[in-house]
């Protein structure tokens, strides 16, 4: 299965460009066409966006059989908010939207192994997806553990990747269903070609 991926920002792109994620795709016989596209903000993912149709078509032209969109939910998890946000994102039969609840950084909070390594102390977050503004929370935690906050989210995302973060590990956390959903959606899309 050949897929294209469009994300809202730099941190998502860093995670999905990682060697670990490419290995995951390869293991599930998924080929990424072209680069992970950073569309540059949530507004550019919307139905009304002028950029989304052309970006989706460009991925199709490169051979993508399906396009996956990853964006942050940025609000408390509820069925209404998930459905409403998904409905705002560009719609097509070959486009699937996945939401990181609250933000992608909640997935970082779900990876105790990597954060314990970065904080040089045992760390576990019971409810990573419940924390409002997890990027801010991570910065406060890093200040507490190391004396340094997070001045650059992209730099912190790279540090997470360089220290072993994987979406699979985040998905194993019992209270991080959005990471699990993202991986399950990819597997479902891949298996559809074999039916």
Image (cartoon, helix red, strand yellow):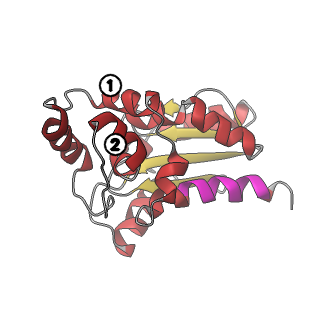
Could you say which disc has been placed on residue 155 in the image?
1
Distance from disc 1 to disc 2, alpha carbons, whole Å, reads: 18 Å
Give the number of the mark in front: 1 or 2: 2
Determine whether, in the image, residue 31 is placed left or right of residue 10: right
Q: Look at 74% across and 52% down and name the residue there.
A: 190
Q: Tell me if mark 1 has few (under 14), some (14-19) or many (20+) residues whose alpha carbon lies within 10 angstroms of its own.
A: some
Q: Look at 58% across and 35% down and name the residue there.
A: 20
Front residue of 85/26: it is 26
Q: Main secondary structure of the magenta part?
A: helix
Q: Look at 34% across and 42% down and name the residue there.
A: 115
The quadrant in which the C terminus is found is bottom right
The quadrant in which the N terminus is found is top right
Of helix, strand and loop, which one carries label 1? helix
Could you say which disc has been placed on residue 116 in the image?
2
**Outermost residue toward the front?**
121
Determine whether, in the image, residue 32 is placed left or right of residue 150: right
Region in magenta: 182-191
Check residue 16 for magenta coloring: no
**63 to 99, vertically: above or below:** above
Check residue 186 for magenta coloring: yes
**159 to 188, vertically: above or below:** above
């Amino acid at each position: 299965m050949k897929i294209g991926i469009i994300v809202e920002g730099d941190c998502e792109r860093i995670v999905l460009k990682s060697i670990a994620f490419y290995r995951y795709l390869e293991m599930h016989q998924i080929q990424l066409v072209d680069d992970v596209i950073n569309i540059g903000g949530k507004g550019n993912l919307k139905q009304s966006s002028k950029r989304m149709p052309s970006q989706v078509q460009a991925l199709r032209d490169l051979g993508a059989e399906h396009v996956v969109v990853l964006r942050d939910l940025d609000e408390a998890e509820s069925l209404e908010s998930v459905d409403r946000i998904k409905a705002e994102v560009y719609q097509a039969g070959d486009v699937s939207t996945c939401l990181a609840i609250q933000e992608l950084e909640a997935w970082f909070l779900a990876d105790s192994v990597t954060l314990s390594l970065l904080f040089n102390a045992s760390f576990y977050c019971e409810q990573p997806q419940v924390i409002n503004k997890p990027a801010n929370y991570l910065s406060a935690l890093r200040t507490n553990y190391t004396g340094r906050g997070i001045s650059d989210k992209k730099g912190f995302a790279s540090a997470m990747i360089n220290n072993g973060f994987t979406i699979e590990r985040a998905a194993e956390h019992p209270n991080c269903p959005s990471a699990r959903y993202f991986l399950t959606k990819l597997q479902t899309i891949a298996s559809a070609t074999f039916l």
